Image (cartoon, rainbow, N blue to C red):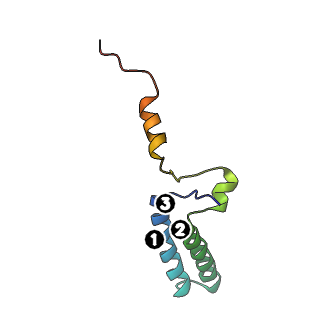
Amino acid sequence: MRKNVGTAERIFRFTFAIAFLSMGVFKLFSPAWSTFFTILGLEVLVVSLIGYSPLYALLGFSTHNPRLAVKEEAEMWTVGKPDSEK
């Protein structure tokens, strides 16, 4: 299971998970909506904690930008057309 949710999105999801869970737990709405917000909050919380979204995997989408190894980073800087100093 590869991570496919980036750090900024994980922070964003965690914030919304807390909001959804609080709306569900404190029963601010009808029982049906409270149950919906609780389930939604749990799903968003799990995704934010593990960094993997099954929906993103199904759609082939990823916001996770893995860091490159030093060798790969060096290749990115050295490969390509040389600059012309004319």
Work out whether residue 27 can be spotted: no
Circles 1 and 2, Cβ within 8 Å, touching? The answer is: no
Q: Nearer the viewer, residue 27 or 41?
A: 41
Where is residue 82? Give x, y as percent.
40, 21
Who's the residue at 55% across and 58% down the image?
A: 5
Work out whether residue 72 can be spotted: yes
Earlier sequence position, callout 1 versus callout 3 = 3
Q: Residues within 10 Å of mark 2 (few under 14, many from 20)?
A: many
Q: Amino acid at mark 2?
A: Ser
Who's the residue at 59% across and 76% down the image?
A: 42
- Residue located beneath label 3 in the image: 9
Where is residue 51? Give x, y as percent.
55, 64
- Residue located beneath label 1 in the image: 15
Residue positioned most to the left: 86
Per the model, the C-alpha gap separating discs 2 and 3 is 8 Å
Q: Give above or below for 46 relative to 56.
A: below
Earlier sequence position, callout 2 versus callout 3 = 3
Q: Residues within 10 Å of mark 3 (few under 14, many from 20)?
A: some
